[in-house]
Image: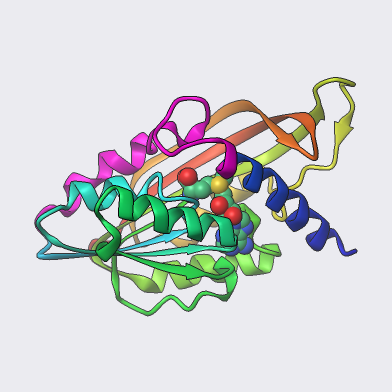
Amino acid sequence: MSKIDAIRLSEKESHETLYKNNKLFEEGSFLYKPVKTVMDILPLLTNEKAVRVLDLGCGVGRNSIPITQYFAGKNCLIDCVDLLEIAIEKLEEYSKQFGVNNSIVKYKSAIEDFEITEDTYNLIIAVSALEHVATEKDFICVLEKIKHGIKKNGVICLCVNTEVVETDIKSGKLLDAQFEVNMKTVDMNDLLFKTFSNFNTLKSTVVQQEHAIKRNERDILIRTQVVTYVVQKLNC
Ligand SMILES: C[S@@+](CC[C@H](N)C(=O)[O-])C[C@H]1O[C@@H](n2cnc3c(N)ncnc32)[C@H](O)[C@@H]1O
């Protein structure tokens, strides 16, 4: 099995376990609440008549569903993209449960295969997802597509794990990080700033985080530098 296939299989297993065993907006996992940075940028879009959003690696909708709720009463449409069948199934279930199914269009696709239509979106988000495209080349290509897909005054919010280290909690053994793209933090920031050099930077932070996950019945500690990068397209 290739390295990418092995990573994808192990990621599939850990996300399937997570999405089966944890409910959206209930305590116990990261699904508990939307990302604060994502919610904080929504007021920037309140003057738009219609809001088109793209959520890459959307999971079960922990950000997309609150976004549609925030823009309730406006014409808001979110394109949600995820590789996993179970993510899309749960997204369907939750978007019906929360009464926002008409605002959410679901795509079961790899981010790197998804065509981003030019000059279309008011908001593009990718939370803990872009590091799972197949290669660094794909990563760069997706950033370019995002850059061209955003409309004037639109906002891009990316949260990307870098310098990921994984440890088996029981044995303390260092493991291969199951991330397709595991860049140095400094290289990630350079790439983001270079790609969006004409944009207005609203936020650029690096926060060290660690959390435990279950993968193949093993408890794994993940240590990561989370790069959060928010830009707005003003005059370019
Ligand atoms: C850590 S979860 C984050 C989900 C969501 N963004 C959130 O904040 O709740 C990562 C998600 O990305 C999806 N994913 C991983 N690799 C992907 C790829 N190459 N293309 C599309 N989705 C992918 C996984 O299936 C998973 O649902």
Report the side of 14 relative to 125 (left or right). Answer: right
Q: Nearer the viewer, residue 203 or 19?
A: 19
- The reply to whether the magenta stretch includes residue 22 is yes
Which quadrant of the view contains residue 219?
top right
Left or right position of 158 against 161: left
Is residue 185 visible to the viewer in this orientation of the structure?
no
> What kind of colouring is applied to the model shown?
rainbow
Could you say where residue 203 lies in the image, as x and y percent from the top left?
Answer: 37, 41
Does residue 33 show up magenta in the picture? yes
Horizontal side of residue 36 vs 89, given as left or right: left
Q: Position of residue 132 (x, y in %)?
A: 64, 56
State the residue at coordinates (58%, 43%): 20
Report the number of discs: 0
Where residue 162 appears, as percent x and y from the top left, is 64, 42
Q: Residue at x 15, y 52 (%)?
A: 72
Residues in magenta?
19-47
170 above or below 17? above
